[in-house]
Image: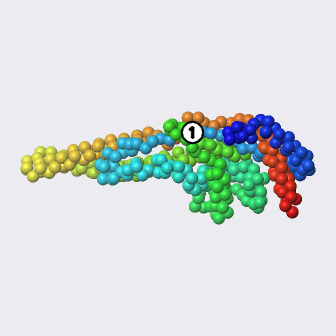
Amino acid sequence: MSEERNDQFSLENVLVKLMGFIPFVKRNKLVIIIFTLLGLLTGLGVEIYRSTNSLKKVKIVFVLESEGADNGLAGLASTLGIGTPSSGNSIFTGDNFKELLKTRNIYRKAILTKVKFGNKTDYFGNFFLQRSELQNHEWSDLPVDFINHRFKTGNLDSIDVQDKNIINAISVYLNENTDIYLDNPKSSFQTLSVETRNDTLTHVWAQLYLKTITDYYINTKTKKSKELLVIMEKRVDSLRSALYYTQGRLANYNDQNQQIIFQRARVIAERLQMNSTQLQALYFDALRNYDNLKFSLVKESPLLTIIEDTELPIFTLPYRWGKIISIGTLLGFLLGCFTAYLRYLYRINY
């Protein structure tokens, strides 16, 4: 039995079957040639489209800061009777951070941020509408005024309905062409990948996107510190006023009673002196905490440390022709053979 199977799959057997396939091709050459040409032309069309519709891609490698101590502010917060939230539920950890990157607010802030390209400064949204070339591709069916639209303000509360529609459309496109991933699961290095049809647009968006996330992080992380700073500033001012007032009363009392005879007068002077000393200690302690808090704000570290940045011009490899044409031609040939075989079965049965 095994010898028979080996016989069926021997080289000689395969060659005999291939030789028998040649007459089949000759008999149906017209159908096969038509389908092969269709496959070749389809592959050529795809090649031409891809060569003229090449995307400019950039990558930025960065490290996301891990959540840790809350910058030494817990002591100050507890001094003022303010609780500090747990870092376990932070929006900047794990999957929370990935979801944050997809939110509409991040994209809206970035799109309505002013950027500089060449000698001109304008909102990124206007720069995108000028350089994206979407009117010749994905947005070819949209009205002309959609592409010619220009944003007049960066305030999200002041934009109209048309502004929001265009911002949403830009956000969808950028979201589909912006990705952050881990090249190596064992490494903490993350990669931001951006693709558009314009190299300057790709470069500017990649840097603006990371900057928007970093600014959002700093504003969020320092919000608690700034609130504490306001409270500490009011505390320092009130203690200073109370201290100066008490010191003034003590000085006036001593001036009016330079030779104290009665014990009651001496007790009042000692109380004023004690209040002055206590207020002075509280004032200096609050002033020290206030200075430490301001120093901690200066030391706030950014969310992202960029390891490898993007730069212009963006180098792109020349397009390699032939692969898709070959695949299309082969598929067309096989489809032609299959169609010819179906015709052969139809003629036999009918």
User: Position of 96 compared to 330: left or right?
Assistant: left
Q: Residue furthest left?
A: 262
Q: What residue is drawn where x is 65% and y is 36%? A: 311
Callout 1 amino acid: Asp
Q: What residue is drawn where x is 64% and y is 55%? A: 172
Whether residue 62 is visible, yes or no, is no
User: Position of 102 compared to 218: left or right?
Assistant: right
Q: Quick one: 197 or 188, which is closer to the camera? A: 188
Q: What residue is drawn where x is 69% and y is 52%? A: 126
The image quarter containing residue 20 is top right
Q: Quick one: 204 or 36, which is closer to the camera? A: 36
> In the rendered image, which quarter contains the N terminus?
top right
Q: Does 342 sit above or below residue 279?
A: below
> In the rendered image, which quarter contains the C terminus?
bottom right
- The x and y percentages for residue 283 are 29, 45
Q: What residue is drawn where x is 40% and y is 49%? A: 88
- The x and y percentages for residue 156 are 59, 58
The image quarter containing residue 343 is bottom right
- The x and y percentages for residue 322 are 80, 39
Q: Residue furthest front?
A: 1
- Colour scheme in use: rainbow
* Mark 1 element type: loop
- The x and y percentages for residue 174 are 65, 51
- Residue marked by disc 1: 183
What is the total number of numbered labels drawn onto the structure image? 1
Q: Quick one: 161 or 175, which is closer to the camera? A: 175
